[in-house]
Image (tube, grey):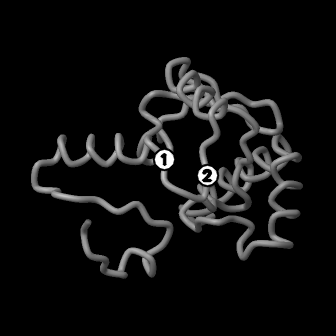
Amino acid sequence: MSSREPLEQALDEARAKFINNNPASQKSHAEACLYMPGGNTRTVLHTSPFPLTFASGESCYLTTVDGHEYVDFLGEYTAGIYGHNHPVIRQAIEKALDNGWNYGGHNKIEQVLAKAVCTRFPSIEMVRFVNSGTEASVISKPC
């Protein structure tokens, strides 16, 4: 018996337990693979044999489609430090939803955000909000 065999056996058992405990995530991943390469939009999120699929989040917890709850130590890589479903953030979103949020034209909120960015970071004189790198590379003249 090689020294690797116990480790390989333990990994096989852990993999089998993961698969057995997460059938809904496995099904979700299989369905996602029909429409997205690798079954996801960001390859960094893929794990073998398949990634967990999350159904909801509350505070610092995530719940999978299989009903398992996990502490979210990742925080969505960025702005998730406030947790999931934070009441103050939720209230701001609901206020925005009440007034509409995508007008296809100018609105007062974009200049409030632009001013906040320029004020917080004095080296930034002006900002342009864009949807893509292509759009960001277009130079426009200030007013």
Q: How crowded is mark 1: few (under 14 residues within 10 Å), some or many (20 or more)?
A: few
Vertical placement of 127 versus 64: above or below? below
Contact between marks 1 and 2 (CB within 8 A): the answer is: yes
Q: Which of 102 and 81 is in front in this view?
A: 102
- Give x and y (percent) for residue 5: 63, 61
For residue 42, which quarter of the picture?
bottom right
Residue under pointer 2: 103
**Picture residue at 72% right of the left edge, 41% below the top:** 54
Left or right of 22? Residue 111 is left
Which is nearer the eye, 137 or 80? 137
The number of numbered badges drawn on the structure is: 2
Please state the horizontal and vertical placement of residue 2, each as a whole percent of the image.
Answer: 58, 66
Distance of mark 1 from mark 2, alpha carbons? 8 Å
Work out whether 56 lies above or below 8.
Answer: above
Q: Which residue is drawn at 26% across and 46% down?
A: 117
Check disc 2 and report its element: helix, strand or loop: loop
Q: What residue type is labelled 1?
A: Asn
Residue 94: which quarter of the image?
top right
Q: Does residue 93 sit above or below 106 in this rendering?
A: above
Disc 1 on helix, strand or loop?
loop
Residue receiving disc 1: 107
Query: Looking at numbered disc 2 in the image, what kind of residue is underneath it?
Result: Tyr
Q: Is residue 84 left or right of 68 when viewed as pictured?
A: left
**Quarter the C terminus occupies:** bottom left
Q: Determine the residue positioned at 50% across, 44% down.
A: 76
- The residue sitting at the top extreme is 87
Task: Kindly identify the residue that appears in the image at 61 percent across and 52 percent down.
Answer: 103
In the rendered image, residue 35, in percent from the top left (x then y), is placed at: 82, 72
